[in-house]
Amino acid sequence: MKALKKILTIIGISLVVSSCEALLDKDPLDSLTSGQAFATEQNLELYTNGFYQMLPPVPWARKYSGSGVEGWFFNQDVMSDLTGWAFVNTYLTSNFTSRNAQNWTWGNLRNINYFLANYRNNDVPDNIRDHYAGIARFFRAWFYFDKVSFFGDVPWYGEPLEPDSPLLFKGRDSREMVMDSVLADLDFAVAHISDRKDPTSSIITKWVALALKSRICLFEGTFRKYHHELGLASTADSWLEKARDAALSVINSGNYSIYETGSPQSDYRELFTRENPINEEIILARIYNNSLQVWHDGTRFYAVNDGVFLTKRFVNTYLNIDGTRFTDNSDYNSTIFVEEVKNRDYRLSQTIRTPAYTYSDGFKAPINFGRARTGYQVLKFSLDDKLYETLEQNYNSIPIFRYAEVLLNYAEAKAELGEFTSTDWENSIALLRKRAGIQDLSMPTVIDPYMKEQFYSDLNSASLMEIRRERAIELFGEGVRYDDLKRWRQGHLLEREKDGFYVPELNVLMDINEDGRSDVMFVTGSVANPVTGVYYFVINNATLKLSEGDKGRILWQSNAPRLYPDHKYFAPLPFNELVVNPKLEQNDGWDRP
């Protein structure tokens, strides 16, 4: 708990080692020599605690730098085929250029490399020094993974550079070289960071490093497998084997399990609403805390702000509670909302507001159609007190790594390697479905035609199809979907229509939350005598349409182009950086100076 308080203090009130965004040209500690800065174990700990501010923010926050709303576009909760967005995502239009580019920031790397160049300047025992070096290399591996997943080839810097160093103006190193260096950092971290399980789920341990390794190696293995243009397919299996083995090490440790109390209606969501992380499943969390006033705005974002909302195309993939497929019903696309959400995988009602949802005071909360334009309003990270819809003071900690993801990484790596068995199913996917209340836990042997038609037309493995279904549902909103689409080479799914629930007719009052009062009416214009408490949802046949004209699925932003040609798998390098350093080469398909 003492270490947790240190980290919360550093993160919460920004008493961190410099995290400037300039390119590798600032000293992390201006007033101390390296001998002073790293003289004791306490100093090593204090310095590496500063790296924790690099942990990802909440999944809906602006992940990358940029002006205005630009920072939203690469956020994985937004950059997803599973959601609709309240704004136009310009990355998916022809207007996005290198002048809009983001994420070419290097200040954090300077701080890490400075530590790694100087952490031995003391008499601290080697095993203790290497523990903290392992933490530094953990963060460097994550830093570079983020850069490679975003840009592809990037320059590798393994040491701090002086402001006049010519290496500041070198070109990009190859993906193979950078990712091999990332793997070396991960292996060092796994070998040297303490293997003590952290009861607060807030400290980097060996198990966190293994979880990150399973994520990164799965990404790299599948990216190389499906992106044939790289010419690296022959090396894909090696990365998949490393993903498998890292996940298996976490599994075999016995430190973690799927959180399950026998309450499938609430167990899943409880992982995302607690102030103190549930440490039997959550390996690492972004900590929020009332006493230190470290808060986020999750409730307000999804309930009031112009956030994101689910599409019907995704909602259709949730199984029935008996384990059958919802889309095997002939009327699955014309079932009204209050019926389609009944008797489904319990994660659905813990991800969006359904008629059963109530605030903590017992009031049945209606859907805010002004924000959830498809009708599927996200509540996964929200607190149930309505107060938090007006205050940005959510105290619930947000998982970064969960045991559930480790199981999914393991299952997918095994399936991609052709090794997946019924025993693997029982020890991974079946555990997640059991927690969700699904009754038939057997492994499907026939591929789901809906999933093949609507999502992965080139996939012919029933087990891999189910793993991808499970990954989308279990990890929704946790910051992995865009990377999944990129590594599977499924970016074209971002172009698909943003559809919502079925509207049987216009100009009819509807009770969506089944409280006996009307909530919404779908109309084509103004209403002469509006009813108090009813939201009049205007179908303007431009931004909002119905799929069958006067009835059908809501179609959101059907007039907005969404384009994801192949070159968008790699974001553009910023225009100004190319001007300053002519040795940097722009990614194919993007504009150049």
Image (spheres, helix red, strand yellow):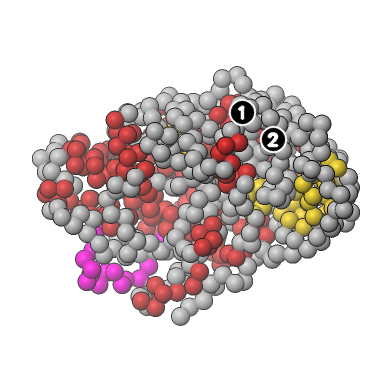
- Residue 234 to residue 5: above or below: below
Q: Is residue 18 visible?
A: yes
Q: Is residue 167 magenta?
A: yes
Secondary structure that dominates the magenta span:
loop
Mark 2 vs mark 1: which is more N-terminal?
A: 1
Between 208 and 559, the residue placed more toward the observer is 559
**Badge 2 vs badge 1, beta-carbon distance below 8 Å:** no
| Secondary structure type for disc 1 | loop
Q: Position of residue 431 (x, y in %)?
A: 58, 27
Quadrant of the rendered structure where residue 192 is? top left
Near-viewer residue (41 or 429) = 41
Amino acid type at circle 1 is Ser
Q: Is residue 456 visible to us here? A: no
Q: Which residues are magenta?
A: 159-175
Secondary structure of the residue carrying numbered label 2: loop
**Which residue does the numbered mark 1 point to in the structure image?**
360
Q: Nearer the viewer, residue 21 or 238?
A: 21
Which quadrant holds the N terminus?
Answer: top left
- Looking at the rendering, which quadrant does residue 21 occupy? bottom left
Picture residue at 24% right of the left edge, 40% below the top: 45
How many C-alpha atoms fall within 10 Å of the one at disc 1: few (<14), some, or many (≥20)?
A: few
Q: Residue at x 18, y 47 (%)?
A: 119
Kindly identify the residue that appears in the image at 53 percent across and 25 percent down.
Answer: 259
Give the image quarter of residue 542: bottom right
Asked whether, in this view, residue 411 is left or right of residue 116, the answer is right
Q: Which residue is mark 2?
A: 365
- How much space separates mark 2 and mark 1, taking CA atoms? 10 Å
**Which percent across, then down, holds residue 308?**
63, 50
